[in-house]
Image (tube, rainbow, N blue to C red):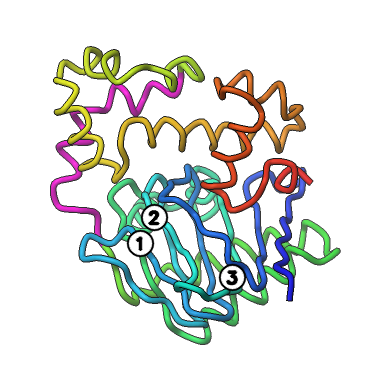
């Protein structure tokens, strides 16, 4: 059976995006999103990487709640295919919709843990919500359903995967670079030497600090941020060639390879 991947977006609901993939063997490199993300394993065995203690096996019916900017990857077990759903939600919208910063900080704050929920009621509710999003129902029905699902899941604990214990101080050391996305895209094409000079560390210390704080090397972090910008550009309808040039990729082929490695879809497929 051929793998099938479908995306759902609606200009009337710019704060949420959904994806369905069936019988997929495509793999993700470790990556992070600026969004609060929820994944659901529908079939097949997959592996979550991003836990300090090592990979975690995920069985069908598992929900994975990933806070913004947490480096992770979910991939099929070796030589296997899997089916899954993925929801990306704007974290700022989510906080406003639930109207309780204290309530949401422990699930989508910077230091919030990844949560693995293996409860069939929660999985069924997620499938029902995603089916509604992909349907022809009105926005006035979809948005309240999304808010209700997020509020109901606030109390689900399941298995938690915390950030590495030493991540916070390293994140503080490289904060000027992490915050430099306001200067994008030039700030995401700095050399390692330039990055080290900006934060007053040696190049070796910069690499070590990035790995401890984000789970990525400086270069991998830059590519991840550029792909996140590319997703926004594609949603806005920016032509592929212009987008690749603006974000500093060597050519459109390079852009396609990097984008696919981090999103498991080609830019053109994602845009459609």
Stretch of the chain drawn in magenta: 162-182
The quarter holding residue 203 reads: top left
**Label 1, on which residue?**
49
Position of residue 260 in the picture relative to residue 211 (left or right): right
**Label 2, on which residue?**
72
**Label 3, on which residue?**
84
Alpha carbons under labels 1 and 2: distance apart: 6 Å
Name the residue at 53% across, 85% down: 121
Residue 199, compared with residue 57, is above or below; it is above
Assign a secondary structure to mark 1. Answer: strand
Residue 70 rendering spot, x and y as whole percentages: 37, 49
Position of residue 235 in the picture relative to residue 197 (left or right): right
Name the residue at 74% across, 70% down: 2
Residue 21, disc: none
Alpha carbons under labels 3 and 1: distance apart: 16 Å
- Dots 1, 2 in contact, CB < 8 A: yes
Residue 222 rendering spot, x and y as whole percentages: 42, 30
Position of residue 233 in the picture relative to residue 52 (left or right): right
Name the residue at 58% across, 59% down: 87
Q: Nearer the viewer, residue 62 or 154?
A: 62
């Amino acid at each position: 059976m051929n793998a099938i991947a479908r995306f759902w977006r609606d200009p009337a609901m710019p704060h949420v995006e959904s994806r369905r993939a069936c019988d997929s063997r495509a793999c993700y490199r470790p990556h992070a999103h600026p969004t609060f993300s929820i994944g659901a394993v529908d079939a097949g065995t997959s592996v979550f990487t991003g836990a300090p203690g090592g990979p975690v096996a995920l069985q069908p019916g598992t929900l994975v709640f990933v806070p913004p900017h947490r480096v992770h990857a979910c991939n099929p077990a070796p030589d296997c295919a899997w089916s899954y759903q993925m929801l990306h939600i704007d974290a700022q919208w989510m906080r406003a919709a639930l109207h309780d910063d204290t309530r949401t900080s422990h699930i989508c704050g910077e230091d919030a843990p990844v949560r693995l929920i293996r409860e069939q009621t929660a999985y069924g509710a997620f499938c029902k919500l995603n089916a509604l999003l992909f349907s022809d129902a009105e926005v006035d029905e979809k948005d309240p359903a999304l808010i209700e699902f997020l509020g109901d899941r606030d109390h689900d604990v399941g298995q938690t995967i915390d950030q590495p214990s030493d991540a916070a101080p390293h994140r503080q050391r490289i904060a000027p670079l992490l915050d430099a996305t306001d200067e994008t895209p030039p700030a995401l094409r700095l050399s390692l030497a330039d990055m080290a000079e900006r934060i007053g560390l040696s190049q070796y210390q910069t690499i070590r600090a990035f790995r401890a704080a984000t789970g990525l090397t400086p270069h991998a972090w830059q590519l991840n941020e550029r792909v996140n910008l590319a997703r926004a550009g594609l949603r806005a309808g920016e032509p592929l060639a212009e987008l690749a040039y603006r974000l500093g990729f060597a050519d459109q082929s390079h852009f396609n390879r990097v984008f696919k490695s981090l999103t498991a879809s080609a830019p053109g497929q994602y845009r459609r």
